[in-house]
Image: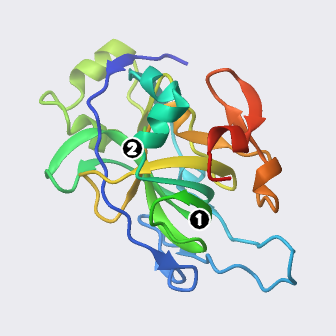
Amino acid sequence: MKKAIIIMTVLSLSGCEATTLAESLKEDHLDSGETAVLEPAAAPEHETPKYEYYDAYAQLEGEVYTSEMTYDYIQFADKDYIYDYAEDIVVGHVISIDKGSNWNEIAEEYCTPYTLGRFVVLKSFKGDLREGSVYQYGRQGGIVTAQEYYATYEDKGDKFKRMTGTDPDYIGQFPIHSNKIEVGKTYLMYIVSAQGVKDTCAIFGQKCGLRELDELFPEDYANAKVFNNVMEEWENLADVVPEV
C-alpha cells in the first residue's frame, strides 16, 4: 500500500458529557441508518456484561487509501507527566466507532481526520467521569470520504491524486506513532477536554494514552496488566496508576 507522510496539525476535542447505557438506546449512528443498542443484557452477578457493538469503518465499501502523519508523543511516555497532564484516567470498554471526521465544529474549519465513537467507563482512577456511564470519545486519526478530505485543499485533491496515483473512495490518516482504537477492546485511557467537537472526551498521547488491558472486564484491577506500547510489553496496572 502506498503511504504519504503528512505533517499533522493538532486536533483539539472537547469536554465530556455522559449518558447512561439506557439513555444511549435508539441513538442513530451517523450515515449508517442503523440503531445502536448499548444496554447490557441482563446477567447474573459476576457475569460479564454483553453489548452490541458497531464499527463504522468495517462497513465501508470501496477503496480506502491510508496515509500517515507525524506527531511528537515522546513526552507522554513518562508515566508521571501523562498522569499529571490528564484530566481523567479511566479503564474504558469501546462499544463503537461511529464515524471519522475532519471538521472542527467549534472553529468551523477543516482539520486533520479524527475518529468518534463511544465507550463505557468501567473504572475511574482520576477525574469526574462516572463509572457505568457512556461517553463519546475522540481519537486523533480517522477515515473520511475522499470528497471530505479534498475539501481541505484549494485544488480539490488534484495534487493528491497526481502524487499518489490513486483516486480512492475514502482516505484515512493516522499518526505514525499511534495505535488505532478498536471496537470491543478495553483500554486504559488518558483523557483531556479541549476544543473542536462538543461533548467529547479527547483520548490524547497517541500510543501512550490508549493502552490495552489483558482482560475485557477485569474483576481485580490490582492484578490486571496493561500493555506498554513503547516498550511493547505487558506491565502491572498498579505500577502505572497509583490509585489502583
Q: Position of residue 66 (x, y in %)?
A: 48, 28
Q: Which residue, given by chain and number where applicable, does mark 2 sit on?
A: 114
Residue type at tag 2: Tyr
Is any atom of residue 32 visible in this view?
A: no
Is any atom of residue 184 visible in this view?
A: yes
Q: CA distance from mark 1 to mark 2?
A: 21 Å
From the viewer's perspective, is the residue at label 1 or at label 2 nearer? 1
Residue drawn where x is 87% and y is 74% of the image: 47
Front-lying residue, 61 or 7: 7
Pointer 2 local density, CA inside 10 Å: few below 14, some 14–19, many at least 20: many
Quarter-wise, where is residue 218 in the image? bottom right
Q: Position of residue 240 (x, y in %)?
A: 64, 39
Q: Is residue 89 left or right of residue 195?
A: right
Disc 1 is placed on an element classified as strand
Q: Is residue 92 above or below residue 113?
A: below
Quarter-wise, where is residue 166 in the image? top left
Front-lying residue, 57 or 213: 213
Q: Position of residue 129 (x, y in %)?
A: 48, 66
For marks 1 and 2, the one nearer the N-term is 2
Residue drawn where x is 52% and y is 26% of the image: 77
Task: Tally the numbered discs.
Answer: 2
Disc 2 is placed on an element classified as strand
Residue drawn where x is 49% and y is 16% of the image: 2
State if disc 2 and disc 1 touch (CB < 8 Å): no
Residue type at tag 1: Val
Residue lying furthest front in this view? 242
Q: Which residue, given by chain and number where applicable, does mark 1 sit on?
A: 121
Q: Is residue 156 above or below residue 200?
A: above
Residue drawn where x is 47% and y is 36% of the image: 82
Pointer 1 local density, CA inside 10 Å: few below 14, some 14–19, many at least 20: many
